[in-house]
Amino acid sequence: MFLSFETFLDNLDGVREQIAATCEEAGRPAESVALLPVTKSHPLDAALYAHKAGIMAVGENRVQEALGKIEQVDFDIGWELIGPLQSNKAKRAAQRFCRIQTVDRLKILNALQSHAQDADRELSILLQVNAGNDPNKAGVSIEEAPALLEAALQCSHLKVDGLMTIAPLSEDLKIARSCFSALRKCRDELESSFSVKLPELSMGMSGDMRLAILEGSTMVRVGTALYGKREYA
Ligand SMILES: *Cc1c(COP(=O)(O)O)cnc(C)c1O
């Protein structure tokens, strides 16, 4: 059975306490880290709970599943795509999501630009960087990130808010931490070489958010710690 709203609120308190404590440890204001609840694999109620708790957006990683929920939703909440996007789904993605966090190649970039233009909207994006050099993870390499950013900055209907990464799965937390630190360094270098602001660093999940916040995360994407275990990763 899906968890109750009361249990969700308890979990939310716990996650927010953890964020606040880590921010204090890092000497950062607690408001500097946003929480994106990840509702994938859960019923639409997961997004409703977030909405009722005053949260503005949730994350989904499968386009088809997310679009199904977006069709049904009758309350106001934004949807961020945090999973892979194929170009045959770019049109509906560009129309329906408030932000796409997983732009990692030119083909997707150009498809989103063209569909956002057709839809007459400005679409926010993050560039997904494979900062942990993980062969199992999507994302542009750190070396190729400048070229992708350069192209993205030329897209009239896309707004690049920053970068996103997923740390390699490993028992060794040092590996996640060095991935987060590499993403921040990559962001700093891109900001200075392109003279742009890339304020958003989307990094950290239920198991590694403390390290991500210590390394400068501005958005943690949290599923399990809010909603419990799910059917798939
Ligand atoms: C599923 C998912 C999350 C949330 O993971 P949890 O470990 O359940 O917090 C975060 N980011 C991405 C990209 C995901 O696919």
Image (cartoon, grey):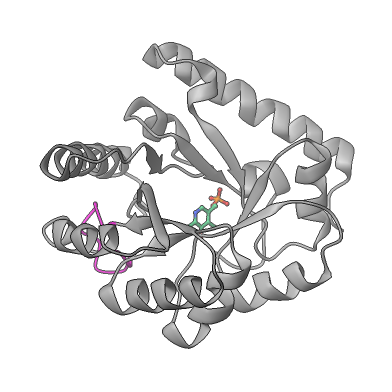
Seen at 45% across and 71% down, the residue is: 84
Residue 161 image position (x, y, % from top left): 39, 47
| Residue at 50 percent of width and 40 percent of height | 220
- Identify whether 192 is placed above or below 66: above
x and y, in percent, of residue 4 in the image:
88, 45
Residue 44, placed above or below residue 187: below
Residue 169 colored in magenta in the image: no
Which is nearer the eye, 116 or 224?
116
Q: Is residue 93 left or right of residue 154?
A: right
Residue 62 in sight: no
> In the picture provided, is 22 more to the left or to the right than 51?
left
> Is residue 131 within the magenta segment?
yes
Quadrant, the C terminus: bottom right
Q: Where's residue 167, x and y in %?
A: 34, 50
- Report the magenta residues as a range: 129-139
Farthest residue to the bottom: give it: 88
**Residue 128, picture quadrant:** bottom left
- Would you place residue 84 above or below residue 123 in this image? below
